[in-house]
Image: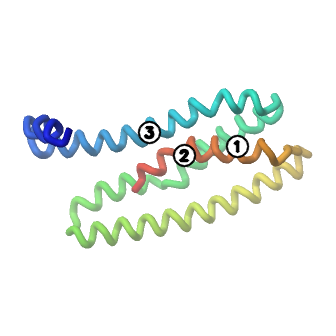
């Protein structure tokens, strides 16, 4: 199998082969997230009531908006900035971005939890914990497959 891969890669210019491999990794992470969402959706329809599903849809839409703030286009920054740096500086930049992104997302998560708690409190919404909250957690995590691609 490895010889077949090497044969096809030898037919391409060196820069193009690495571009194709990197694109394949990027595409694979997208496919995994989409497959998780596709497989889990019928389960959620069966297990959730109409009201619970509406709440889930609301928070999924809200999650898609907040996701833009969670990554802050750090991928683009790293791609552009890393071209100018040496290998050790690239590693240091990546480490700094990962650490910053981790703590930034912790802060966003804490603020988001407070907002969700206040929303439920003000609107009088009650939702049973099991199985709804773990299911919603899986949906929100699987819809965030783009964050895997940040690193």
Mark 2 or 1, which is nearer the eye? 1
Alpha carbon separation for disc pair 2 and 3 = 10 Å
Can I make out residue 38 in this image?
yes
Question: Which quadrant holds the C terminus?
Answer: bottom left
Can I make out residue 16 in this image?
no
Residue 144 drawn above or below residue 38? below
Question: Which quadrant holds the N terminus?
Answer: top left
What residue lies at 71% left-to-right and 47% top-to-bottom? 134
Where does residue 38 sit, x and y in percent of width and height? 56, 30
- Residue 144 marker: 2
Q: Which residue is mark 1?
A: 136
What residue lies at 42% left-to-right and 42% top-to-bottom? 29
Q: Which residue is mark 3?
A: 30
How many numbered discs?
3
- How busy is the neighbourhood of tag 2: few (under 14 within 10 Å), some, or many (20 plus)? some
In the image as oriented, which residue stretches furthest toward the right?
Answer: 124
Q: Is residue 65 left or right of residue 53?
A: left
In this orientation, which residue lies closer to the viewer: 21 or 2?
A: 2
Where does residue 49 sit, x and y in percent of width and height? 82, 31
Where does residue 150 sit, x and y in percent of width and height? 42, 53
Residue 43 drawn above or below residue 29? above
SS at mark 1 in the image: helix
In the image as oriented, which residue stretches furthest toward the front?
Answer: 1
């Amino acid at each position: 199998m490895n010889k077949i891969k090497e044969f096809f890669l030898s037919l391409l210019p060196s820069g193009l082969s690495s571009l194709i491999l990197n694109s394949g990794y990027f595409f694979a992470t997208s496919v995994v997230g989409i497959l998780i969402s596709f497989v889990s959706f019928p389960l959620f329809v069966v297990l959730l009531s109409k009201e619970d599903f509406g709440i889930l849809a609301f928070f999924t839409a809200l999650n898609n908006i907040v996701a833009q703030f969670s990554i802050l286009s750090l991928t683009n920054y790293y791609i552009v900035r890393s071209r100018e740096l040496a290998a050790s500086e690239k590693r240091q930049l990546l480490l700094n971005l990962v650490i910053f992104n981790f703590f930034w997302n912790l802060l966003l998560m804490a603020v988001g939890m407070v907002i969700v708690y206040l929303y439920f409190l003000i609107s009088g919404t009650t939702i049973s914990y099991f199985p709804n909250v773990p299911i919603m957690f899986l949906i929100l995590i699987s819809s965030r497959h783009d964050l895997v691609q940040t690193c």
